[in-house]
């Protein structure tokens, strides 16, 4: 059959085209993948820029800390004896004294109030150098907060942790070699070294021996020439004396090595606290781990009291953070031992034992009665054993009366120093008899102890999680710092670490304000003797600012609160019926009525 030729119309027929043809799925996925890759690359570039900014701020902090090297040198006889012992260990140290250069002396001579040749100018330079380091640390915390607002990859988080740890090590090593000077802030470190030498070389207990009998010891002459009132040894726990004994044995007869040993211990404890803070914040609140760790790790006040003027509070914080870590790892026995050791290091930390006890009691309810009873008996035996081993070397000549005196010294001190109580006693007005009786240190301490007991009772009722236990522990310490008859600025180290770890914003704000007051108090003491009335500025002003901050924040939230009526869903209806089962009898008729109403 012959095929018919195609008609012209059919050959010219055009096929209809779709006006909005969708691209293939592979093309859509490719375009989305490319846009996501571009956005991720831009975020990575911004993140690396912020990391570079953190490095610049670390350099700024390092410059501020290095500037302190020649500023801690004193010209009196006491300072010469202590500095000679330090300079014999590090002969290269004078090369870092930038104030000896002609350029620095020529430029700073144009400004008399910054001249390093005068005591007033040196004091102002110290304030400027530490202010520079403080501004760098605060800006670093703000950059850390900026980084946390966006999602950070796991690899970048590892880089940030290494950077924070490297900054802590670098700043700590810088302050490790700062010249030792005899001033009020160095006196407790010298006293700890003297106690260690009493135990190591003279085989005398600081609790029973008279320190003046060792007047031939070089550290005793340095303490006497320092001009500061020596603290009572009954406030120091036996565990801390064991640490002082170990450092004295390792340092030998060299005072320079003794000071270096205390500083090295403080540096190791500071680095350990930084690692534990990062680990804890990564578990409880990952959105604040960079900011919270930077607030502690690069803080110049924390670094100075951890390394230069080494205090036992940095080791106490390490014990508490380790106890928290063991609680997270389901090791309550080790956690309890660490809390007991912290109380044996400082008697004031006995107040944290009820907090730990109440938390462990709630956790033990999951066990059977037999296992719970055996566990608590074992905990009691371990507590008695640890306490007996700690007090055994010092029991002779001390006994129960010595322990009672130590507790009275910690909780009912006979004098008020640098506190609100001391400031109120020195007011230039005549107070009534009832108020003057209340302002006596022991009466005031009794009232503060009652407030702390009330706070502990509330905590025992509410504590059910690790962050809640940390929060109440922090508030117990803060209440003691704000109201106890004796106040020293280094008492702020453990509350700062616990406030960061607990992730409570309001508590952290109060702690930061109190840290600012402690910072101002520390640098005032470097230039003059403590004044009782200054506690109103270092303690009362931060508390007042925190109260006003709470007021304005609450007012702002009330003014900007939106009135919204929540929509009712069937799930909400069923939930309401379950919650109101005692007043609303549930039956099929009521359920059908509720469904028809919805």
Image (cartoon, rainbow, N blue to C red):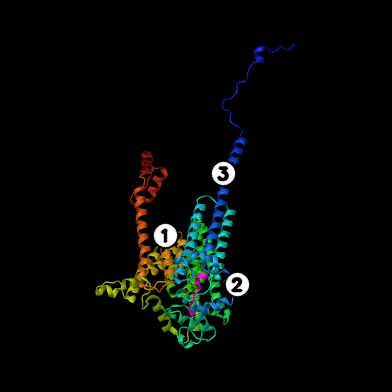
Kindly give the residue lying farthest to the left in the view shown: 432
Q: Which mark is on residue 251?
A: none
Q: Residue furthest bottom?
A: 213
Judge the density around disc 2: few (<14), some (14-19), many (≥20) Cα neighbours within 10 Å: few
Q: Badge 1: few (under 14), some or many (20 or more) residues near its Cα, within 10 Å?
A: some
Residue at the spot of label 2: 92
- Residue corresponding to mark 3: 39
Q: Is residue 40 left or right of residue 435?
A: right
CB under 8 Å between discs 1 and 2: no
Element at badge 3? Answer: helix
Residue 266 part of the magenta segment: no
Between the C-alphas of marks 2 and 3, the distance is: 51 Å
Q: Nearer the viewer, residue 349 or 95?
A: 95
What whole-number distance in Å separates the C-alpha atoms at marks 1 and 2?
42 Å
Q: Is residue 41 left or right of residue 498?
A: right
- Residues rendered magenta in the picture: 70-77
Residue 349, percent from left and from top? 44, 72
Q: Which residue is mark 1?
A: 509
Q: Earlier in the sequence, mark 2 or mark 3?
A: 3
């Amino acid at each position: 059959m012959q095929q018919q030729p195609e008609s012209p119309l059919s050959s010219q027929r055009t096929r209809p085209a779709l006006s909005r043809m969708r691209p293939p799925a592979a093309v859509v996925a490719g375009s989305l993948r490319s846009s996501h890759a571009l956005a991720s690359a831009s975020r990575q570039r911004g993140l690396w820029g912020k990391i570079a900014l953190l490095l610049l701020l670390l350099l700024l902090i390092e410059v501020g800390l290095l500037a302190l090297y020649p500023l801690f040198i004193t010209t009196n006889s006491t300072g010469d004896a202590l500095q000679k012992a330090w300079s014999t260990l590090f002969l290269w140290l004078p090369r870092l004294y930038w104030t000896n250069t002609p350029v620095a002396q020529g430029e700073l001579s144009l400004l008399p109030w910054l001249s390093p040749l005068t005591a007033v100018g040196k004091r102002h330079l110290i304030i400027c150098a530490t202010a520079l380091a403080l501004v760098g640390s605060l800006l670093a915390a703000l950059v850390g907060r900026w980084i946390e607002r966006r999602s950070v990859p796991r690899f970048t988080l590892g880089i940030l942790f290494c950077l924070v740890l490297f900054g802590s090590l670098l700043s700590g090593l810088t302050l490790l070699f700062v010249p030792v000077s005899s001033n009020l802030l160095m006196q407790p470190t010298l006293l700890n070294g003297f106690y260690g030498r009493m135990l190591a070389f003279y085989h005398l207990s600081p609790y029973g021996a008279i320190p003046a009998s060792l007047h031939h010891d070089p550290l005793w002459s340095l303490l006497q020439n320092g001009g500061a009132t020596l603290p009572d040894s009954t406030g120091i726990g036996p565990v801390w004396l064991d640490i002082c004994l170990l450092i004295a044995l390792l340092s030998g007869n060299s005072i320079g090595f003794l000071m270096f040993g205390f500083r090295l211990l403080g540096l190791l404890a500071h680095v350990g606290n930084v690692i534990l803070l990062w680990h804890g914040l990564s578990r409880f609140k990952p959105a604040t781990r960079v900011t919270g760790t930077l607030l502690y790790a690069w803080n110049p006040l924390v670094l100075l009291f951890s390394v230069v003027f080494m205090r036992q509070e940095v080791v106490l914080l390490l014990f508490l953070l380790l106890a928290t870590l063991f609680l997270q790892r389901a090791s309550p026995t080790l956690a309890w031992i660490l809390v007991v050791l912290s109380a044996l290091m400082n008697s004031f930390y006995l107040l944290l034992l009820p907090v730990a006890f109440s938390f462990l009691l709630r956790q033990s309810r999951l066990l059977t009665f037999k296992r719970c009873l055996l566990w608590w008996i074992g905990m009691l035996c371990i507590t008695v054993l640890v306490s007996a081993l700690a007090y055994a070397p010092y029991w002779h000549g001390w006994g129960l009366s010595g322990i009672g005196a130590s507790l009275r010294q910690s909780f009912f001190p006979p004098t008020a120093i640098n506190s609100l109580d001391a400031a109120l006693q020195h007011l230039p007005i005549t107070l009534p008899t009832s108020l003057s009786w209340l302002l006596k240190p022991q009466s005031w301490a009794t009232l503060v102890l009652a407030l702390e007991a009330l706070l502990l009772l509330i905590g025992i009722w509410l504590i059910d999680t690790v962050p809640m236990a940390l929060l109440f522990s922090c508030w117990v310490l803060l209440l003691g710092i704000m109201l106890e008859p004796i106040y020293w600025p280094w008492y702020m180290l453990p509350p700062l670490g616990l406030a960061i770890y607990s992730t409570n914003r309001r508590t952290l704000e109060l702690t930061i304000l109190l840290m600012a007051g402690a910072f101002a108090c520390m640098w005032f003491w470097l230039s003059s003797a403590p004044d009782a009335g200054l506690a109103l500025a270092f303690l009362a002003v931060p508390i007042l600012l925190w109260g006003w901050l709470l007021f304005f924040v609450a007012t702002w939230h009330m003014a900007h609160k939106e009135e919204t009526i929540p929509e009712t869903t069937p799930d909400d209806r069923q939930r309401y019926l379950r919650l109101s089962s005692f007043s609303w009898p549930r039956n099929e008729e009521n359920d059908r009525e509720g469904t028809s109403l919805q």
